[in-house]
Image: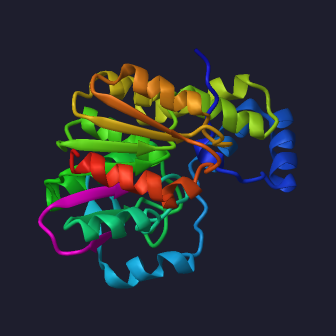
Amino acid sequence: MTKKTSIHTQSLKIPKIILLTSKLISFISPKLITLFIAKLFTTPIKHKIPKRELEMDRNSVQKLIKIPAIDKEVVLYQYGKSEKKILLVHGWSGRGTQLFKIADELLKTEYSTVSFDAPAHGKSPGKTSIMSDFIATILEIDKQFGPFEAAVGHSLGGMSVLNAIKKGLKVNHAVVIGSGDIVQDIMDDFVAKLKLKPSISTRLRLYFEKKYKEDMNSYSAYLAAKETTIPVLVIHDNNDPEVPVTAAMHIHKYLKNGELLLTDGLGHRKILGNHKVIEKTVQFIQNK
């Protein structure tokens, strides 16, 4: 079952200079193009925090914490004062305040939230990041600031939440929104957007596997879903241009206790601010 996802290239048109440079390097050396693509693939774009997120930014307690497993630091956001805590996880090139509308609604229902800028994202230091950094950060935050009632993840954050649960994160409920499912598909799509030969995608995967000494496809969300027994709500838009809805269906198929909510016309990010999506997310966490 082949599904193309594009977590790392969320609605970004690749600049022509990058396309030309990639093409040129690919002619010169397969090794050099693999290194170049690996750098692009692991370098998020830091966006200026939009006005709509400033209230959460102002009203949260922020601190820089160390993640020993990866020897990196991240900025943590504690929003609200309730002992009933929800962990929020943004996607690639996102920020800890990106799920602010969900956070605001959770505060109204007597929860507090903890979120973070993943390594090399938002206010966190660093230049490069990868999904395993997200997962290590989730597990360390759980250790230091948990336990959490539930976890909510968007896009790559959704994949990271499922993988963190697989690796020991204990929550009662999880919600994944606009999440991709198969790691190889993500790499295939990234290489295709650069207009390079598909074989380079395989080289990229092998490069990461040698570097991190792990099977990259073992991080595929549907594999984590197979081992997840808690209730999981999968939310996705039928018209998501970046991560196709088939990814959500694939994840849902393998969940033992899954629920699927599909929306129309909300795309990949607008979905985070939709009233129906927020209401369903909060109700699901409350187990209503």
Q: Residue furthest top?
A: 1
Task: Tell me if residue 131 comes above or below residue 115 in the rendering.
Answer: above
Vertically, is 19 above or below 27? below
Quadrant showing the N terminus: top right
- Determine if the magenta segment contains residue 154: no
Position of residue 141 in the picture relative to residue 255 (left or right) = left
Q: Magenta region: which residues?
A: 76-90
Q: Is residue 87 left or right of residue 24?
A: left
- The quadrant where residue 174 appears: top left
State whether the magenta stretch is mostly helix, strand or loop: strand
Location of residue 86 by image quarter: bottom left
Examine the structure image and report whether residue 87 is included in the region drawn in magenta: yes
What residue is at 51 percent from the left and 58 percent from the top?
Answer: 274
Q: Is residue 21 above or below residue 167?
A: below
According to the image, what is the colour scheme of the structure? Answer: rainbow
- The residue that appears at 81% across and 55% down in the rendered structure is 15
Foreground of the two, 75 or 5: 5
